[in-house]
Image (spheres, grey):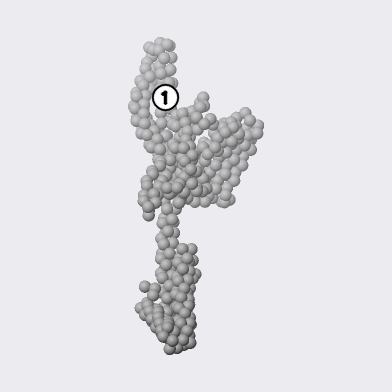
Amino acid sequence: MLFSRHIYWTTLGHILFILATAGTGLWLIISQQGVVIGILLVICSLFQIGRLVNKLNSFNQKLRLFFDAIEDKDNMLYFPENNVSREQEMLNRSLNRINALLIRTQAEYSKQEHFYRSLLEEVPSGVLAWDSSGKIMMANSAALTLLGCQQLAQYDQLKPILQEKEKKERLSLSQNQMKLQNETITILSIKDISNELNDKESESWNKLSHVLTHEIMNTIAPIISLSQTLSAYPDNSEKTLRGLHIIQAQSERLLEFTESFRRLSYLPQPERKRFSLTALLQNLQELLSTDFQENQIHFTLTCQPEFIDMDGDENQLSQVLLNLLRNSIQALDGRTDGAIEIYAYRDEHISIDVTDNGPGIPDELQEKIFIPFFTTKSEGTGIGLSLCRQIIRNHNGHLSILESRPGKTIFHIDISL
């Protein structure tokens, strides 16, 4: 209680003293036994009433100031406990204790809030929450990154973003509601499932490749052997020999195609070791310098920082980058203003962008080119980019087309450290 028993009895004593003084003064006036003294006693009682009212008003004013400070979240308020009356000292001490308790409670609340917000920032999935009015109460960094925006204030800003076709295809959404002090809070969980879909797709292709490789090899090997044996017979006619040679040639072509299956299906796991990515890129630049000159291509290599080291299979990653560079060279065939740029940078990831100013890749083909055995070239097996993506995936990374339009195509490699 803010008012102690001492304050209670003191106030009651003041009231009784005022009543006694006023009553005595009125009696003296009415009885005519001391009119002057009676008037003085009444005036004295009025003066005492004023003092009591001022004291009570000072208590009320102090309480009002205290509660206003709480409402405004002002914790700097302090009431002096020295050089004041006994009642004021006890009241001020109680208010200061309550204020100190509120400060500790608020500090604990802020600490917990900071902990939970930090915890949400570490969650790889995106998390958003908004109230019944549509105001976004919280959105962690993962959510903003997945949605491709810097900040969100209202749910109305979120709806059109979620309706975009690209985000519909690669994002998994989970929505729940909860009650918090009579307020309905909606929580949305966002997860990027594109890598999972790519992993499942790659796994399916690998299984298919294993089966097809086994079946085709078992079927084609006896045909080649038999055609070779029959061709060796001395009594074969010219037509028979020509037919057998055709069977052998077609079988060997089919066997060569099957070897493409084998390279994709039996890709070894990377042998990781520390190597210089900068030196690897410089070696590729030197290796292809003649191709760049013959095709009139201006090549640029930029590394940020200048020297980048990483852990991985140097031979496999060299194969990936060489394949991407050769694809860019082919895309610039016939041009005299061709340009290829490699930009490698390292932060919490290793990122490599291979950019050319070729004709670009049509939107409908940008994902198909990573499908095994799909090709737009008259010659080729169509496993190059599939193999590259699988190698990067085995390095805990991702290979994708960052941008493609006439005059600019960017293949992007991102590898987690």
Task: Residue 34: tell me if it is visible.
Answer: yes
Count of marks placed on residues: 1
Q: Position of residue 10 (x, y in %)?
A: 39, 81
* Quadrant of the image occupied by residue 168: top left
Determine whether 30 is above or below 297 in the image: below
Q: Taking 140 as reference, is 61 above or below it?
A: below
Which residue bears the numbered disc 1? 254
Within-10-Å neighbours for mark 1: few <14, some 14–19, many 20+? some
Residue in front for this viewpoint, 392 or 247? 392
Q: Residue at x 38, y 43 (%)?
A: 174
Res 287 visible: no
As displayed, is residue 312 above or below residue 246?
below
Q: Nearer the viewer, residue 256 or 208?
A: 208
- x, y percent for residue 244: 40, 16
Identify the element where label 1 is drawn. helix
The amino acid type of the residue labelled 1 equals Leu
| Horizontal side, residue 255 vs residue 361: left or right | left
Residue at 47% of width from left, 31% of height from top? 368
What residue occupies the far front of the structure in this picture?
A: 32
Which residue is at 47% across, 84% downward? 39
Residue at 42% over, 79% down = 87
Residue 222 spot, x, y in % from top left: 34, 23
Check the picture and name the quadrant holding the N terminus: bottom left
Q: Quadrant of residue 200?
A: top left
